[in-house]
Image: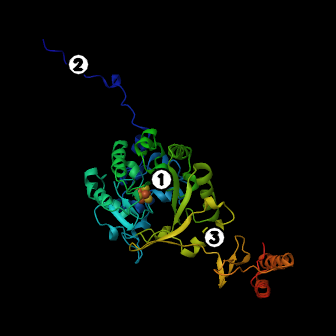
Amino acid sequence: MSEAVPKPQARSERRPRPLGAPWAEDLRAGVRRADDLRRLPLAPEEHEHLRPAATAYKVRIPASYLELVDWSDPDDPIRRQAVPSADELRPLPGERPDPIGDAAHSPVPHLTHRYPDRVLLYPTYVCSMYCRHCFRKEALNEDDRGVALDRLEPALRYVAEHPEIREVILTGGDPLTLSDGQLERLRSRIEAIDHVRLLRVHTRVPVTLPTRITPELVRALRGRLVTVVVTHFNHPREITMAATEACRLLREAGFMLLNQSVLLRGINDDPQTMETLVRELVYTLGAKPYYLHHCDLTRGVSHFRTSLDEGQALVKGLRGRVSGLCIPHYVLDLPGGDGKVPLGPSFVRGREGRCWSFETWDGGLHEYEEQLREPGPSQEVPEPDREDRALAWDAARALAHHGARALWHEASAAVRGLRRLFRGSTIHR
Ligand code: SF4
C-alpha cells in the first residue's frame, strides 16, 4: 500500500525558519548591495549622489555597524567609513590602484613577500564590511570569492620552500570571514611548516561584525604557533560592548592583540578623538595600538587623507599625555612596494658629537651627553666637588627646560661652557 502523501501545511502551521548565527543575521539585515542603500535614511539627492560610487566599488555594511551611525550628521565618522561617497570617483593624479605595491612583490598568486622574514597570504577577498578608505579596494573589486585552499597550494609551497619566513600574515579581504573549518585547515597547513614561528591575522571583523568571534572560531585558530590578532579600530565609537566581548574571547584564547588604525581626516585626526581611541584600545579592549597608518595613495580616498605634518603633530601630541603603551608607530607605506617608513615624530633637536639636545614631551629642551667607556686605561677623574658641579649643571638645564625659548640659546651656551670646564668628569643627574 502506498503511503499517503502528506498535505502541504497551511502557511500559519509552518514552523518559523530557524535563525542563523547572530553574525549571519547581522549581515543579512544590513546593506549587501548598492540597491540596499535606498533603505538608509538619506535624502533622495544624497542617494543619487552616492550611487555611482556604490556601483563602482563593493558595498557591504552589517546592520549592527549601521546602528552606530548618527544619521543627523552628514559627516558622522561611522557613516563616512561605511557609506559610499561621490568623492571616491574623484581621484588625484598621483593616486594608484595598488598603492603599496602588493603585486610588485607577489612571486606566486595570493602571496606577497616584501620583507625577508614574513609573507602576506590572501585566503579571501571578501570582507564583513567594505570600508570606504580601504587601500585594497580595487583588488577586492576584482575578486568576490573566498579562495579555495587548493588555490593556495602554490603560496603554501612557496612558504615551505623559504626557510627565512618566520611569520605568515593572513590578510585579504578579511580572513575571519572564512568558515571555522576553512580557518582550521589553513592554520594546520601553515603550522605544519616547521620554520614558521608566528601566525598573524589582520582583521576588521571584531569591529564590524564582532559576533562572528565565537569560541568555535577561536578554537579553529589555536594551535602550536604564537598567534597575533591585529584588529582595525579607527574611532572610539567602534569600541562597543560586542567588540569588547569579541576582543575578550581573543585575549583569553592566549592571542596577542594589537590594533592598526588608519589616520583619516574628519574621523580620527583630532587630538581628543585619537587620545580616546588609543586609551580605550588599551584599557577597554586590551589591544596595543601598533601602527597608525598614514592614509595611502589609494585611488579616490583623498577626502580621507591628512598631510604628513598634521599626522606628525597629532602623534607628537600624544607623547606625555598618554602612556607609552597607548602610542602607535606612525608609518607610511611607500608606494611601489618599498615598505614602511616610520614617520616619527623625532624629539632630537640637535647634536654635537656625543652631546645631544632633545625636546621633552612638554616642549622643553634637554641636553644629554653620552657616557661611553673607551677601550684602554681607566678614564676616572678624581672629583672633590662633584656635587657642586652637578647642581650647576641641573640649574642650567632647569633654565633651559622651563625658561622661555628665547633664553634657550643662552642656557645652551652655559651648558656648553660647563661641559668644556668639566670635560672628562662624570656628572650625576
Ligand atoms: S575590512 Fe580591511 S580589507 Fe576589508 S574593506 Fe575594510 S579595510 Fe579593506
Q: What is the spatial separation of the Cα atoms under label 2 and label 1, in whole angstroms?
A: 54 Å
Upstream in the sequence, badge 2 or badge 1? 2
**x and y percentages locating residue 359 in the rendered image:** 69, 76
- Please say which color scheme the image uses: rainbow
The alpha-carbon separation of the residues under discs 3 and 1 comes to 27 Å
Q: What residue did someone put label 1 on?
A: 228
Q: Secondary structure at mark 1?
A: strand
Q: Pointer 3: what residue?
A: 316
Amino acid type for the residue under numbered disc 3: Lys
Side of 370 where 117 appears, left or right: left
For the C terminus, give its image quadrant.
bottom right
Q: Residue furthest front?
A: 377
Dividing the picture into quadrants, the one containing residue 325 is bottom right
- Tell me the residue at 42%/75% (across/down): 92
The residue lying toward the viewer, choosing from 45 and 74, is 74
Compared across the picture, whether 422 is left or right of 16 comes to: right
Asked if residue 266 lies left or right of residue 192, the reply is: right
Image height of 143 relative to 12, above or below: below
**Labels 3 and 2: the sequence-earlier one:** 2
Quadrant, the N terminus: top left
Q: Residues within 10 Å of mark 3 (few under 14, many from 20)?
A: some
Report the Cα–Cα distance between label 3 and label 2. Answer: 74 Å
Determine the quadrant in which ligand 1 lies. Answer: bottom left
Q: Amino acid at mark 1?
A: Val
Query: Residue 130, can we see it?
Result: no
Which residue is disc 2 drawn over? 6
Observer able to see residue 315: yes
For marks 3 and 1, give the one nearer the viewer. 1
Where residue 214 is drawn, which disc sits there?
none
Residue 342 position within the rendered picture, expressed as x and y whole percent measured from the top left: 52, 71
Q: Quadrant of residue 297?
A: bottom left
